[in-house]
Image (cartoon, helix red, strand yellow):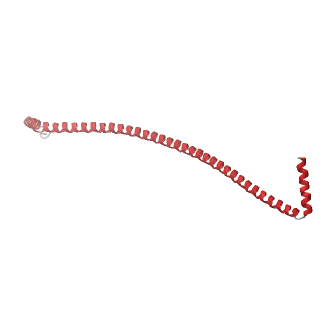
């Protein structure tokens, strides 16, 4: 039973060795271990703070990116709207110009047709008068070949002159 119950001397020397060990550890190892733990705790806190700041910055940048994207979409829509308006105005202007040019060409063609018509009528009148003179000349030659016909024609002309 001696092995199970320790003697007072053994307990004393074990307690004394344990206390010396604690004092020695406190003087030599406890402060550096606590300092290292404290430094590690501070670096972990700093890392957590930096991570939180990075998270906040990421959130801010994401929101800013969303705003920029929304502004870019709005600008794109505005540019497309302006381009469509410009296209429509250019098309309308081109249609108006085409109508004006078409009307001018039609009017010019009408004038040209009218001029050509006048020229043709003048030419036809000239040809008709030439033909009429030729026909009259032939008729008069035929009538003037005979002496009796000449005298009858002169008599008829004299009668008409006296009546007027």
Instruction: Please state the total of marks drawn on the protein image.
Output: 0
Instruction: Return the residue nearer the eye: 73 or 40.
Output: 73
Q: Quadrant of the N terminus?
A: top left
Instruction: Return the residue nearer the eye: 163 or 58.
Output: 163
Residue 20 in percent (x, y) is at 8, 36
Q: Is residue 90 left or right of residue 71?
A: right
Instruction: Return the residue nearer the eye: 55 or 28.
Output: 55
What residue is rendered at 59% in x and 46% in y?
A: 95
Q: Residue 31 lies in what quarter of the image?
A: top left
Residue 96 in percent (x, y) is at 59, 44
What residue is rendered at 73% in x and 54% in y?
A: 122
What residue is rendered at 67% in x and 49% in y?
A: 111
Q: Residue 44 lies in what quarter of the image?
A: top left
Q: From what the image shows, is residue 95 above or below residue 53?
A: below
Q: Is residue 53 left or right of residue 42?
A: right
What residue is rendered at 16% in x and 37% in y?
A: 35
Residue 15 in percent (x, y) is at 10, 35
Residue 22 in percent (x, y) is at 11, 36
Instruction: Return the residue nearer the eye: 85 or 47.
Output: 85
């Amino acid at each position: 039973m001696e092995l199970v119950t320790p003697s007072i001397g053994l307990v004393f020397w074990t307690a004394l060795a344990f206390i010396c060990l604690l004092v020695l550890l406190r003087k030599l190892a406890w402060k550096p271990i606590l300092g290292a733990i404290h430094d590690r705790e501070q670096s972990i806190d700093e890392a957590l703070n930096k991570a939180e700041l990075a998270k906040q910055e990421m959130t801010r940048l994401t929101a800013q990116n969303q705003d920029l994207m929304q502004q870019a979409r709005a600008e794109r829509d505005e540019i497309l709207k302006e381009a469509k308006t410009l296209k429509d105005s250019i098309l309308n202007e081109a249609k108006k110009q085409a109508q004006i040019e078409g009307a001018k060409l039609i009017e010019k063609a009408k004038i040209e047709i009218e001029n050509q018509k006048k020229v043709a009528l003048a030419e036809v009148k000239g040809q008709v008068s030439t033909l009429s003179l030729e026909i009259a000349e032939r008729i008069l030659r035929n009538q003037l070949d005979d002496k009796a016909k000449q005298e009858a024609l002169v008599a008829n002309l004299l009668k008409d002159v006296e009546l007027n």
